[in-house]
Amino acid sequence: METDAQRIRGLADGLTTALAGPVASSGEIRTALEESVAALRRLADVVEQHSAAAATSGRPAPVEVVAPVLGVDGCTAGWVGALLEPGAPRPRILVAPTIAELVAMVRESTGIRVVGVDIPIGLPDSTIRQADVLARKALPRKASSIFSTLTRAAYGAATRPEADAVNRDLVGQGVGAQAFALRDKIVEVDAWLRTRPTVTVLEIHPEVSFATMSGAPILASKKTDDGRDQRLAALAAAGIARPSVLRGQGYAADDVLDACAVAWSAARHAAGLARSMPDPPEVFSDGIPAAIWA
């Protein structure tokens, strides 16, 4: 069976053939084709290295940031982002009151390719999302960190008792306090997505990302010193250096580390290495692909 690296090299070979044809007679076109071939061959090398590392250790090789990406996590101040850029020594941490403002702030100076967000994306109508079911299976002894995404109608309710009644009627499940506490941010991201931002937006769960980069879930709570140290070590081993800022007004260390883990999966997506749960993603009536990426 042809591997991802082989398929990418095949694309590079096809462009190399095009260099010999009349389409490459223009200097600008030829330069663009040569740069594309070189980029594809570098990407193939990265994919091959990751595949080899995963096969021998159960952990992916350190990520190579091939394009600017942003990992985002909710916080008291609104949203905290970890920006990864090719050649940058460590993540850059940014904060804004809304997801739209955070992404706009980053795009003023950086052409980000992917935005990963730790929030449910793609809301079900009358079913349980497979993304949540599969993410729990991927986190043995840590499955409780995955909250069930409510139905779209339940998120439209103003109070938890109203949401509980709606959700029970549609899927037979009640609404917990922690799940409903995410309502405002879920609604905010959903509304932002409907403005059709011209960037790839993915749902990424930090604990799934940490489990992927470590080869197993990190069981220590992210709010303890031990949990923080284990996550910093996992990020370092995965190619993400310690951020220069770990906490500030309106955001804590666990928010920053979660954003960094989300950015790691976003960088894997930009490099063609990330996988979705489910694969392919589900699509409900909102037309938004629903899957958790890692």
Image (cartoon, helix red, strand yellow):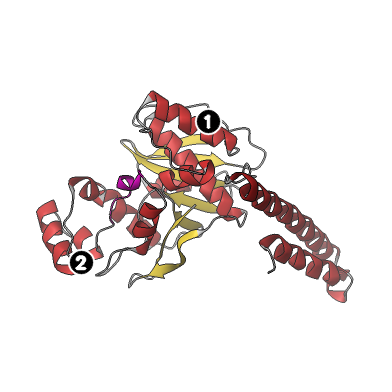
Q: Nearer the viewer, residue 134 or 267?
A: 134
| Residue position marked by numbered label 1 in the rendering | 233
Instruction: Write the residue at 38% across / 33% down.
Output: 222
Residue 44, by quadrant, is bottom right
Task: Give SS at disc 2.
Answer: helix
Mark sitting on residue 171? 2
Q: Is residue 147 magenta?
A: yes
- The kind of residue on which mark 1 rests is Ala
Left or right: residue 70 versus residue 181 is right
Q: Residues within 10 Å of mark 2 (few under 14, many from 20)?
A: some
Q: Residues within 10 Å of mark 1 (few under 14, many from 20)?
A: some
Residue 24, image x and y in percent? Answer: 85, 69
Instruction: Write the residue at 71% across / 63% down.
Output: 8
Vertical order, 22 against 47 (above or below): below
Residue 224, image x and y in percent? Answer: 36, 27
Mark yes or no: residue 247 visible: no
Mark yes or no: residue 44 visible: yes
Give the overall secondary structure of the magenta segment: loop
- Indicate which disc, 1 or 2, sits on the residue closer to the N terminus: 2
Q: Is residue 101 magenta?
A: no
Residue 267, image x and y in percent? Answer: 57, 48
Vertical order, 162 against 222 (above or below): below
Instruction: Write the residue at 58% across / 35% down.
Output: 237
User: Magenta span covers which residues?
Assistant: 141-148
Q: Quadrant of the N terminus?
A: bottom right
Give the distance between the C-alpha atoms of the residues marked 1 and 2, in whole angstroms.
40 Å
- The kind of residue on which mark 2 rests is Val
Residue 290, image x and y in percent? Answer: 39, 63
Left or right: residue 170 versus residue 213 is left
Residue 170, by quadrant, is bottom left
